[in-house]
Structures are given as structure tokens and as C-alpha cells.
Amino acid sequence: MIYNTIEDIRKLFPYLDHGKIYFNHASIGPLSRLIMSRLNEYMYERSTTNIKNFDTFVASDLGGREKLGQLLNCKPDRITWIDNVSNGMNVLANSLPWQKGDEIILNDLEFPANVYPYLNLQKKGVVVKFVKNVNGKIEIEDIKKEITQKTKLISISFVQFLTGFRIDVEELGKVCKENNIIFSVDTIQGAGAINIDVQKCNINFVCGGTQKWLMGLQGLSYMYIEESLQAKMIQANVGWLSVTDYWNLLNYDLTLKDDASSFMNGSVNLIGIVAAETSLGMFLDFGMDKVENYVLRNSKYLISKLVDLGINPILKDTEEKNLSGIVTFPLANAEYFQSEMEKKNIIFELRGGMVRLAPHFYNTIEEIDILLKELERFVK
């Protein structure tokens, strides 16, 4: 089915029938009726009909990777599944041939999943540098100042989880390519809300989750591994699905696959893949350009109205190219405000003691206005 309008999409979410306003997609996305129906079919298979249902895995795996390939602009064989972003970043960190003195550049706004796997390399003599944010923003010029001949990798979030700042990945990708630096991007807070093109942006490695803006299940993430990068990686962990002749179970031939699925060592979250493929279909049917336009419309509207209320969101006066679906602002008694809003079925999150709003493309201006009226009464 093709979904052409916001109204078409809103009909897919049962929580809207119960008067809830949900601005918390940066934490976890709600499940749609599409996913609920597909998972019911899956459960019926596993419990009643095609209990083994290996064909379901094959179809959902291929379909999910094809759809992610459309989302990221890459071939499906460059994508594989993993359980979470932390382990995905560990795959990259632990599969590269590090030398003592090699340098990695991070920043001081990263979610820990994109930090600890690299800090753990310090025991090998790897140097980790942190670029400091400027009022919630990561400036590419500040990153460039930290680059030396020893810089081997830059890893950064497409969208910062706390402030919502979106890095210009195309510009940073050019910097990395010019300096022969591996470019890794955590897409969990961007993919499904904002377009990203791994080819255009010269991205070598991507890891993201399916449970937030892609509105799938927890316990499933994905990795994109660029072909030339994989050729440099020495795979630290392998399993029965890593090898080319994996169905010849007693052969024990450790010839690794030459595509990204080499890093899917064993059984993964099949029910998560079924859900992800279903949800990805909704995004692609609606159109990611339209999704991004609505997401940015909501964020710009929110920022403008917050300023009118005398509130200073972190990304006030920020260019559209650096905005995302996340709008964060300081508020006195933020915890009390959140608890009062939850009583009225308005759901959002607090991060760093600040209010973090994360409406998706199907959220409406009318819903935002309801929150703003409550906020106006609160700040007077």
C-alpha cells in the first residue's frame, strides 16, 4: 500500500486513538499497526504452521537489507545485522590493525556507545582526542584542527542525541577522504528522519538502531561496511554464519564471506528483522524527502515558538542543514513539567536536565501547539 498523506500515516498508530501526544522518538518509537499485523503473522507461523520458517528469515533478511540499502544508498550486501550500536562500534574498533600512537577523533557530546569501544583501545596505545562542542554544536573546523598524520579514524553521530545538532556529514566526509581517514557515523538519531547518503558523503562505516526514528523493535541494529574498509579489517570475532560454506557444518573451512554478512556471526533477532523490514517499507512508500521536510518543519516551528515564549533552545539561530528531529531546551523545574505533561498524555524525555522534544514526521503542528500552550502557562 502507498501512503500519500500524514493522515494516512497517523491511521497506522494505535496510540493516537487514546489521546496521546508522543514526542519521544529519540528514545523509542511507537509500533505501527503494520508491524503488529506482520508480527501476528510471524507468531502464527512459529506456533502453528511453518514452525521452522527459515524461508521467512531469508525473505525478511534480504528485504530488510534491500530497504536499508535504499535508505542509505548502498548495495544490500554492504549491510548486515547486529544486536546494538555498542557492539557494532566494537566490531569496527576491534577489527582494525591499530598501531601504538594511532589517533581517533571523537567529541564531547557523543552517546557512550560511540565512545567506550574506542576508549578501550587506549590499552593498545591508541590516542583518543575529544573535540569540545561550542554551545551544543560540533564545528568541523575544530575537528580539522585535531587531524594529524597519525589520525586513523573519526567517529561521530549524524545527529547528537542531547542537542539534536546534525553534522554536515558530506563536508566531514570530504575532509576524511582527503586525509585518508576512516569515517564512521552513528545514524541512530538520524536515519528514518533525515536523508543520509553513504556514497555521496564518503562514509566508510555506519551503525544505527531500528527502535528509535525507524520505529522498529529493540535489540536489532544494522551496520554498513564499505568494501575497501572491509578489506582492511581483520575480523576479531567469527561464527558459523561468517564463512562462505556455512551449511557444510562439519567442513570447518574458515574462508570468510567477502560481504558485510561476514560480521553476522550467528543467529540474530529475526522478529526484529521482520519488524524493521515492515517499518522501512512504510518510510520508503511515503518518501524520505517528504519525511525529512515534515521533520524539519516541526523542528523549525518548535524552535521559533519557544523563542517567542522567551525560551532559548540549544539550536536557536542554527541553519536548517544542522537541524534534526530533536529540539532541546533548558527549563526550570523540568522534571515537574514532564510529570505534569505525562498526566495529560504528552510524552517526551529529559536529557542532561533539559527538555528534549523529538516529534516525528507524522506529528502535527496542532499537537505541538497543545504542548506550547501548556508550556506557556508553566513559564508565566
Image (cartoon, rainbow, N blue to C red):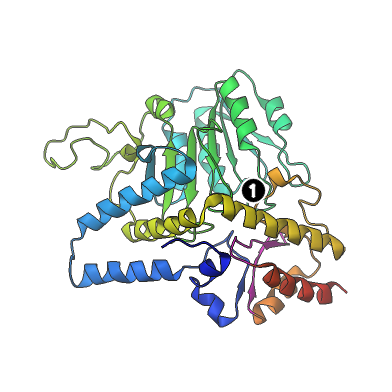
Q: Is residue 104 left or right of residue 36?
A: right
Tell me where residue 128 appears, x and y as whole percent: 60, 32
The single residue placed furthest to the top in the displayed view is 149
- Give the quarter of the image for residue 78: top left
Q: The C terminus lies in which quarter of the figure?
A: bottom right
- Give the quarter of the image for residue 114: top right
Q: In the rendered view, would you say 101 is above or below 189? A: above
Q: Which residue is at a point 65% across and 38% down the rendered structure image?
A: 168
Q: Is residue 205 left or right of residue 131?
A: left
Residue 278 shows up from this direction: yes
Region of the chain picked out in magenta, as a range:
345-363
Q: The N terminus lies in which quarter of the figure?
A: bottom left
Frontmost residue, 162 versus 237: 162
Tell me where residue 45 appears, x and y as whole percent: 23, 68
Is residue 353 one of those drawn in magenta?
Answer: yes
Residue 151 shows up from this direction: no
Frontmost residue, 263 versus 279: 279
Q: In the rendered view, would you say 61 is above or below 44? A: above
Tell me where residue 134 appears, x and y as whole percent: 77, 41
Q: Amino acid at mark 1?
A: Gln
Is residue 288 one of those drawn in magenta?
Answer: no
Count of numbered marks: 1
Crowd band around label 1 with a 10 angstrom C-alpha radius: few (<14), some (14–19), many (20+): many
Element carrying mark 1: loop
Q: Which residue is at a point 37% across and 43% down the rendered structure image?
A: 80
Tell me where residue 57 appears, x and y as whole percent: 27, 55
Determine which residue is flagged by label 1. 160
Q: In the rendered view, would you say 184 is above or below 112? A: above
Q: Which residue is at a point 63% across and 56% down the rendered structure image?
A: 295
Q: Which residue is at a point 22% across and 72% down the rendered structure image?
A: 47
